[in-house]
């Protein structure tokens, strides 16, 4: 092999590896890996949520709040506000969900009480056994 040919081959190899070192991380950034969390179940012990309290969980990458309503039992609602997508929080003292962004308020069924939101919070079905609560 001539020197010139060897130099060309070396430069081609160097160029290819340099290109791959930029393209591979960029493709990993642009195409996120599939999440294993899809279709998973979230199971909690009922004891973790005494009456009048709530617990925040993530289900299929969606933030939810499970509320143990006094006299009405458990309910799972999306925490994503239907106005512009801020995360609502549970106000145990006033028994409602409050959005910090524009002061929207929802009752414990997820229905709009006040504020700019016009749609109810999305409700997720729960499976309730003697000791556990399961979403999914
Ligand atoms: S985002 Fe919740 S009230 Fe605007």
Image (cartoon, rainbow, N blue to C red):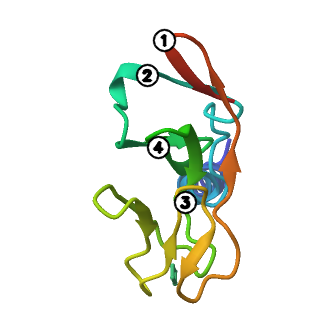
Query: Between disc 4 and disc 1, whose residue precedes?
Result: 4
Seen at 32% across and 55% down, the residue is: 92
Q: Tags 3 and 2 in contact by the CB under 8 Å rule?
A: no
Label 3, label 1: how far apart the Cα atoms are:
52 Å
Q: Is residue 56 above or below residue 100?
A: above
Secondary element under disc 1, as helix, strand or loop, is loop
Label 4, label 1: how far apart the Cα atoms are:
16 Å
- The residue that label 3 is drawn on is 22
Q: Residues within 10 Å of mark 1 (few under 14, many from 20)?
A: few
Front residue of this view, candidates 73 and 81? 73
- The residue that label 4 is drawn on is 67
Secondary element under disc 4, as helix, strand or loop, is strand
- The residue that label 1 is drawn on is 131
Query: Between disc 3 and disc 1, whose residue precedes?
Result: 3
- The residue that label 2 is drawn on is 46
Q: Position of residue 112 (x, y in %)?
A: 60, 74
Q: Position of residue 62 (x, y in %)?
A: 58, 50
Side (left or right) of 116 relative to 98: right
């Amino acid at each position: 092999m001539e020197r010139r040919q060897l130099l060309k081959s070396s430069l081609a190899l160097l160029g290819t590896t340099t290109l791959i070192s930029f393209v591979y991380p960029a493709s990993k950034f642009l195409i996120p890996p599939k999440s294993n969390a899809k279709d998973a179940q979230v199971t909690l012990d009922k004891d973790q949520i005494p009456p009048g309290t709530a617990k925040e969980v993530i289900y299929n990458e969606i933030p939810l709040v499970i509320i143990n309503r006094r006299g009405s039992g458990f309910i799972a609602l999306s925490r994503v506000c239907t106005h512009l997508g801020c995360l609502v929080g549970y106000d145990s003292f006033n028994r409602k969900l409050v959005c910090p962004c524009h002061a929207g308020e929802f009752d414990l069924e997820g229905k709009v009480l006040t504020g700019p939101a016009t749609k109810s919070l999305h409700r997720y079905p729960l499976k309730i056994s003697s000791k556990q609560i399961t979403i999914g």
